[in-house]
Image (cartoon, rainbow, N blue to C red):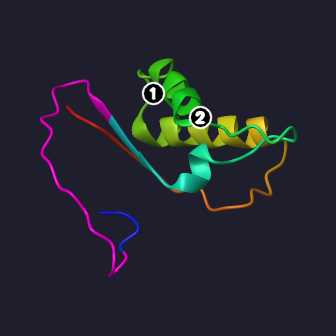
Amino acid sequence: MLGLLPEADYESDKVELRPGDVLVLYTDGTVEAENPAGEQYSAQRLADVVSSHLKQRPGELIETIYASVVEFAGTPQLADDVTLLVMKAL
């Protein structure tokens, strides 16, 4: 669980990953990063980047995502943290 808060309610579920599946966990600073026009990076943009780089190793995919967020924002000085965890099922 990411972002554990004592007063928050959390749901749990199980997902079966098959060989080749990629799981990406991220903090809100990733999808809420804004460009100079005030547009957010968005979960859809993140999904598009992941989908177009599925062959990369997890570490490479993290670097690709982060570079994409920074390029979108137009600065490496993001307003919120960006934390990424990528797992690939073998």
The residue located at (77%, 36%) in the rendering is: 71
Q: Quadrant of the N terminus?
A: bottom left
Residue 58, how many percent across, how many down? 41, 39
Q: Nearer the viewer, residue 86 or 72?
A: 72
Q: Is residue 11 magenta?
A: yes
* Mark 1: secondary structure: loop
- Residue 10 lies, with reference to residue 29, above or below; the image says below
Q: Quadrant of the C terminus?
A: top left
Residue 60, how many percent across, how many down? 51, 37
- Residue 18 lies, with reference to residue 39, above or below; the image says above
Q: Are marks 1 and 2 in contact (CB under 8 Å)?
A: yes
- Identified by mark 2, the residue type is Thr
- Residue 51 is drawn in which quadrant? top left
* Mark 2: secondary structure: helix
- Judge from the rendering whether residue 76 lies leftward or rightward of residue 82; answer left or right: right
Main SS, magenta region, reads: loop
For disc 2, the marked residue is 64
For disc 1, the marked residue is 56
Residue 30, how many percent across, how many down? 59, 48
Q: Is residue 47 magenta?
A: no
Assess disc 2: are there few (<14), some (14-19) or many (≥20) residues with their C-alpha within 10 Å of its C-alpha: some
Assess disc 1: are there few (<14), some (14-19) or many (≥20) residues with their C-alpha within 10 Å of its C-alpha: few
Tally of numbered tags: 2
- Identified by mark 1, the residue type is Gln
Residues shaded magenta = 5-22
The residue located at (69%, 40%) in the rendering is: 40
